[in-house]
Amino acid sequence: MRTHDLIIAGGGIGGSSLAAVMARAGRSVLLLERSEVFEDRVRGEWIAPWGVAEVKRVGLYDLLIGAGGHHLTRHVTYDESVDPAAAESATLPLGIFKEGVPGPLCIGHPRHCQTLIEAAAAAGADVRRGVTVSGLEAGPSPRVSFEHAGETFEAGARLLVGADGRISKVREAAGIALHQDRPHHWFAGLLVDDAGGWSEDLQAIGTEGDFGFLAFPQGGGKVRVYGGYALNQPGRFKGEEGAKRFLEAFAVNCSPANQALAAGRPAGPLLSYFNNDSWTDRPYAPGVVLIGDAAGWNDPIIGLGLSITYRDVRIVSELLLGSDDWAALDFTSYAEERAERMRRLRFTAKLQATLDMEFDDAAKARRASLFERAAADPSLRMHAFAVLAGPEAVPETMFTAAHRARVLGQEA
Ligand SMILES: Cc1cc2nc3c(=O)[nH]c(=O)nc-3n(C[C@H](O)[C@H](O)[C@H](O)COP(=O)(O)OP(=O)(O)OC[C@H]3O[C@@H](n4cnc5c(N)ncnc54)[C@H](O)[C@@H]3O)c2cc1C
C-alpha cells in the first residue's frame, strides 16, 4: 500500500486545482477522478471577479488565460417592464469590483477541468482517471481502495480530501450530514454556437412572461445560456425538440439582442437541474476535509460555485502549507468562514431567485417596482455587489429580513 500526503477524491475544479497547488508546493498527492474524459455536463463557466481574485491567489490565473479564459466587462439586466434602451442605459461596468480584475472570467467547464488536471500531473501529482473508488475509510489514518485499469489498489494518506461533487462519497464515509433547501425553480443550460450578433464582452439576464434568461459569452461566437422556469413545468424542454423550444424561449421583446441567441445552434447537451442551496455544519472530520460542492453548494442562480470552490482551495491549501503537523491541524477557521460565506450567499441567491425566477402577477409587479425604486436608491441592488465583489464586501445589514422586505417592497 502506498501512502501519500494527500488523497483527493474527485478531479473536477476543486480536486484538480488543490492537487496542482499542493503538488507544486512539493507535497505528494494522489488524485482520483472517475471520468476518462471531461464532458459538457452544463456546469459552471463563469467565475465572479472575487473568484478570479482567488484564482490569482492560488497561482492559477495565467494557466486559465492561456487555456482560453475570456473576461466579460459589461452587464445588463433586462425586464419586461423596462424599455430595452432604458435597461441598456444602466449597463454595469464589471471591472469595478476587484482591483486588477477586468471582470468575470469565462472558460468552458470541460476545458477548465482538463487544464487543471494536466497542471496537477505536470506538478508531480499521481493522477488516475477512469477510477472506481470501492472503499473509503475516514479517521486518523485515512485509506482508499480503488479500481484502475483492471487492477485494485489500496492507498493511505495523512489527509483525505472530498472534492467529489454534490453526491460525495467522502462526505458519506466521514459521516458529515448535508442540509438542503427545497428546490425553487428549474434551471436549464445549453452551449450555443453561431450566436454571431451577441457581443463577446456582454453578459445579460432578464425575465419576461414565464421565462428567466441568462447569457454568458465564452468567446469565438459561443454563448452559454441558461433559462429558469417554474417547478410545475418539468417537461417543458424535454424531448427531441427540447433544445429548439428552449432557444425559441430566448426570443423575448425586452432584450432585442436575444434574437442572436434564438438563432444560434446548440453545441452541447441541454440539461435541466432544479436549483436549491445546501450546506454542511462542519466540512471536516478526523482525517477528512471537504471542498467545493461536496461541502455544500450555492443555488447556481447566482453562478458562484466556482468562486466558492476556489476560495475553499485557497483556504485549505494555506492551512496545509502553514503547518506540517497535519494530525494537529484545526479546520475550525475554514468551517467558520465557509458557514458565514454560505449563509450570506444563500440569502443572496434566495433573493435573486425570488426576483428573477417567479412568474406570477405579484412577481411581475415586484420586479417593475424594484426597477423604478432602484433608479433612485441603488442600495436596493446591493445583493449584486455580494455576487460580484464577494459576500464579505457588503455590509452585514444587507443579509437581513429587513433588507429583503425593502427590496421586495414588502415592508410592514
Ligand atoms: C446548471 C448549473 C450551472 C452552474 N453555473 C455556474 C456558473 O456559471 N458559475 C459558477 O461559479 N458555478 C456554476 N455552477 C456550479 C459549479 O459548476 C460547481 O459549484 C463546481 O463545478 C463545483 O466544483 P467541484 O470540483 O466541487 O465539483 P464537480 O464539478 O462536481 O466535480 C467533481 C468531480 O469529482 C468526480 N467524482 C465524483 N464522484 C467521484 C468518485 N466517487 N470517485 C472519483 N471521482 C469522482 C466527478 O467526475 C467530477 O469530475 C453551476 C452548476 C449548475 C448545476
Image (cartoon, rainbow, N blue to C red):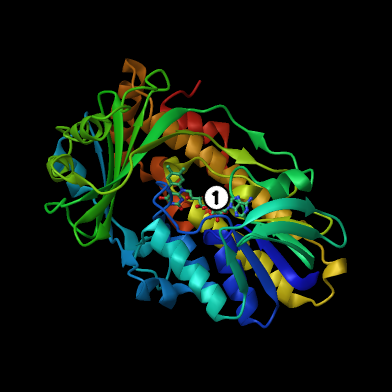
Along the line of sight, which residue is nearer the eye, 353 or 217?
Answer: 217
Left/right placement of residue 133 relative to residue 65 reads right
The amino acid type of the residue labelled 1 equals Pro
Q: How many marks?
A: 1
Q: Does dot 1 land on a helix, a strand or a loop?
A: loop
- Can the viewer see residue 58 in this picture? no
Left/right placement of residue 252 relative to residue 399 reads left
Q: Residue at x 31, y 33 (%)?
A: 212
Q: Position of residue 174 (x, y in %)?
A: 79, 48
Q: Quadrant of the rendered structure where residue 129 is?
A: bottom right
Q: Quadrant of the rendered structure where residue 20 is?
A: bottom right
| Residue carrying label 1 | 395
Along the line of sight, which residue is nearer the eye, 359 or 64?
Answer: 64
Q: Position of residue 363 (x, y in %)?
A: 36, 22
Q: Residue at x 61, y 52 (%)?
A: 164
Which residue is most to the front? Answer: 150
- Can the viewer see residue 266 in this picture? yes
Left/right placement of residue 287 relative to residue 130 reads right
Q: Quadrant of the rendered structure where residue 219 is?
A: bottom left
Quadrant that contains the N terminus: bottom right
Q: Position of residue 122 (x, y in %)?
A: 53, 80
- Is the residue 239 above or below the residue 247 in the image? above
Left/right placement of residue 355 relative to residue 83 reads right
Q: Residue at x 79, y 67 (%)?
A: 157
